Image: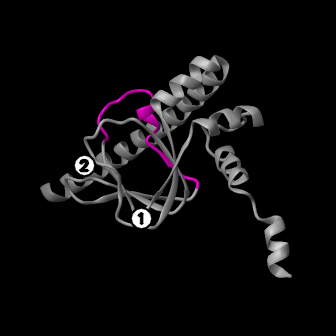
């Protein structure tokens, strides 16, 4: 009996993708039809633990949305993990705007399911539905600007700490 009721309330894969997209700031507030158009451009991929999505220095071609699992963003030059991302997180969105080299390596830490949105697919969407393209690009600019503000604050804090350490060394 429990499995019967559990199956009634379990989301289908398609419903779970819509739920995932609604929680991503780039797609926040889009209509069901617009979300369907976005979903049609996504590429689903499963990764095993230790599998690399892309290496630092590779050209950026798109962004990734984590449906489930854990992805580590790693600085290859030091081996340091910059951040670990998990269910509902997204990364690599700047690659939708330009193809500059990746600033870090992305590696699956656990078995993971991700959806990729790649630049050619986004540009095709913009060509087919310019109004939807503008909505996504405006939201993307907001996300990138918020991340830039956070990065600037981190740099300020690090500079202040560096000045403190310099003063301690000189004393």
Q: Which residues are magenta?
A: 88-102
- Could you tell me what secondary structure mostly forms the magenta stretch? loop
Q: Is residue 91 magenta?
A: yes
Q: Position of residue 103 (x, y in %)?
A: 30, 42
Q: Is residue 17 above or below residue 6?
A: above
Q: Is residue 29 above or below residue 169?
A: above
Q: Nearer the viewer, residue 159 or 110?
A: 110
Q: In which quadrant is the N terminus drawn? A: bottom right
Q: Is residue 134 left or right of residue 155?
A: right
Q: Is residue 90 magenta?
A: yes
Q: Is residue 23 left or right of residue 149?
A: right
Q: In which quadrant is the C terminus drawn? A: bottom left
- The residue that appears at 46% across and 42% down in the rendered structure is 150
- Measured in 3D between alpha carbons, the distance from the residue under mark 2 to the one under mark 1, in whole angstroms, is 43 Å
Q: Which residue is mark 2?
A: 163
Q: Which residue is mark 1?
A: 48
Q: Residue furthest bottom?
A: 1
């Amino acid at each position: 009996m429990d499995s019967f009721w559990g199956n009634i309330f379990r989301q289908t894969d398609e419903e779970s993708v819509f739920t995932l997209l609604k929680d991503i700031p780039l797609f926040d507030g889009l209509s069901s039809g617009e979300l369907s158009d976005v979903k049609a451009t996504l590429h689903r991929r499963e990764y095993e633990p230790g599998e690399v999505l892309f290496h630092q220095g590779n050209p950026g071609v798109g962004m990734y949305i984590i449906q489930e699992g854990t992805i580590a963003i790693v600085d290859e030059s030091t081996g340091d993990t910059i951040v670990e991302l998990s269910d509902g997180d997204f990364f690599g969105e700047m690659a939708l705007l330009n193809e500059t080299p990746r600033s870090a390596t992305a590696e699956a830490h656990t078995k993971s399911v991700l959806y990729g949105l790649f630049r050619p697919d986004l540009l095709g969407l913009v060509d087919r539905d310019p109004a939807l393209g503008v909505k996504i690009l405006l939201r993307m600019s907001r996300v990138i600007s918020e991340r830039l503000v956070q990065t600037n604050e981190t740099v300020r804090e690090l500079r202040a700490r560096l000045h403190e350490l310099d003063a301690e060394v000189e004393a």
